[in-house]
Structure formats: structure tokens, C-alpha cells
Image (cartoon, rainbow, N blue to C red):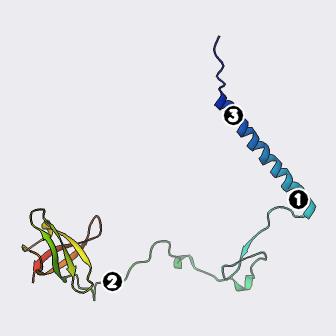
Amino acid sequence: MGKSQQSFSKSEREKKRLKKREEKRKKMEARKIEAKESGKKGIEFAYVDHNGQLTDTPPDPSKKVKIKAKNIEVAIPKKEDETEDFDPIRKGTVSFFNQSKGYGFIIDSETQEKYFTHISGLIDEISENNKVSFELEKGQKGMNAVNVKLT
């Protein structure tokens, strides 16, 4: 003969499940009784008026706005060309550069922001306190200075 598969933890879980089901049934019965006493017939409707506010009255059909389907934009709106007045070449000063490890940092002269640069992004050899011009490129941890040249 086989041993019973019913363990203590299984019986406890079953008791909790049955208790939860019974509580849910009691709550449902209480809601039904309350609805009969108050005269409500279930869930009330909520409407959205022409201003986007929730109300309990239907919206006025005279204030309805007609929108053509072709005017609805589902995607992100296209950006206008902002490159007209933006100069991609920036100027700055090398604040730190480790020749043996091949990386350093450049401080932009306009914004005073510090940008990482790697030896692979250099055109000329640089050292600390050199004035340089560079371009920015998106890197793994932020913007990186590339095409770095001495000025």
C-alpha cells in the first residue's frame, strides 16, 4: 500500500484557499444585500465630457468635436531639422589624459561639461592642458569626444 500524498503544508494551503473563497462569497452576498436596500442597480456609468473630465451625466452632443482619422498621429512626431544652427565641432581643454592606458577627459569651453575620450578617437596626440577641437558621439555611458584635434 502507498503512503498518503497529503502533507501538512498541502492541507494548510487547501484550508487557506477555502477560507479565501468563503470570504469572497460573503463579500459578494453583502454587496448584493446592500444594492437591494439602497435601490442601486449595479455599477454606475462614468462619462467623459468635452473637457476630458469624468462626470455622471452623458456629454452634450452639440459640443462634440469632429476629428478626421488622417489628422491623428499615432507615432512620435518627426523632428524639424535642428542642424542648421548647431555646430558639431566643439572646442575645449584636455583636463586629464593617461597615455599608457589610452583614455582621458576633455572639458568643453562653452558648457564646462566633461567628456570622455579614448585614444582610438584621437587624430593628433594630446596631453594635459592642450586646447583641442572635437565632435561628440553617443557612447555606452554618455557622450564621448571623438575626432580630437589640436587647435
The numbered mark, 2 or 1, whose residue comes first in the sequence reads: 1
How far apart marks 1 and 3 lie (CA) works out to: 33 Å
Q: Is residue 110 above or below residue 149?
A: below
Q: Nearer the viewer, residue 71 or 95?
A: 95
- Judge from the rendering whether residue 119 lies leftward or rightward of residue 51; answer left or right: left
Q: Secondary structure at mark 2?
A: loop
- The percent coordinates of residue 132 (x first, y second) are 13, 81
The numbered mark, 1 or 3, whose residue comes first in the sequence reads: 3
- The percent coordinates of residue 7 (x first, y second) are 65, 26
The numbered mark, 3 or 2, whose residue comes first in the sequence reads: 3
Q: Which residue is mark 2?
A: 81
Q: Amino acid at mark 3?
A: Glu
Q: Is residue 131 above or below residue 11?
A: below
- The percent coordinates of residue 15 (x first, y second) are 73, 36
Q: Residue furthest top?
A: 1
Q: Which mark is residue 12?
A: 3
Q: Nearer the viewer, residue 90 or 53?
A: 90
Instruction: Determine the residue positioned at 88% across, 59% down.
Output: 34
